[in-house]
Image: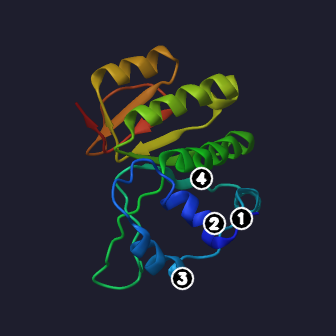
Amino acid sequence: MLSKDEHYRQIFLNSSSHKVDYTNAFEKLLPLLPDPIPLHDILSDLRYNLEIFPDAMLGEVGLDRAFRVAFDYFVHPRQLTPFTIPLNHQLAVLEAQLDLAVELGRNVSLHSVKAQMATMDLLERMVRKHGDQWNKISIDMHSCGLSAQMWVDLEVLGILLRYAKNSQLVRKSTPTYFYPCRLS
């Protein structure tokens, strides 16, 4: 297992997209971050909680390319770091959570912020991976933007969508609900 420093250095400083040196920000942030928890442990806790609350859905989970890590989340005004969580890290965690939701037959509250293509690719992968089991859960999706073509592409894959606007159902099918989403 990686040390705290190695774990967060790998997440925040190993990105090829960093064109400036963020070492000072990293050194300021590191002592404020929690110790890393292995994904296996997170999933074990999630499984336990979902099993003791049999009517609970999985959420709030998702992808967010706009989120920036705060130096201290509880201090106001909040000062943001230059760091985001790499999309591949978010995808690994989210896919493991969705696998568990499918296994336990739990609906999911899912957001997708500035990650429409990654979300579509993930949903396609889930359909292929889980087949009919995927259709036994509902995905309540919000904070997303879908082009009209993405909507059609998802329906072609058998990912049936609902779009709710101001609590009014706009399109009738199941099991995925998108609200409030911006259709472009």
Do we see residue 51 in this rendering? Answer: no
Distance from label 4 to label 2 (Cα)?
Answer: 30 Å
Where does label 4 land, which residue? 58
Distance from label 3 to label 1 (Cα)?
Answer: 16 Å
The answer to whether marks 4 and 1 mark residues whose Cβ atoms lie closer than 8 Å is no
Mark closest to the chain's N terminus, 3 or 2: 2
The answer to whether marks 2 and 1 mark residues whose Cβ atoms lie closer than 8 Å is yes
**Where is 170 relative to 156, above or below?**
below
Where does label 2 land, which residue? 6
State the SS at label 1.
loop
Q: Label 4 crowding class (10 Å Cα cut-off): few <14, some 14-19, many 20+?
A: many
Mark closest to the chain's N terminus, 4 or 3: 3
Mark closest to the chain's N terminus, 4 or 2: 2
The answer to whether marks 4 and 2 mark residues whose Cβ atoms lie closer than 8 Å is no
Q: Position of residue 119 (x, y in %)?
A: 46, 36
Q: Position of residue 137 (x, y in %)?
A: 61, 37
**Where is 26 relative to 164, above or below?**
below
**Kind of residue at disc 3:** Pro
Where does label 3 land, which residue? 31
Q: Position of residue 123 (x, y in %)?
A: 53, 31
Nearer the observer: mark 4 or 2; the answer is 2
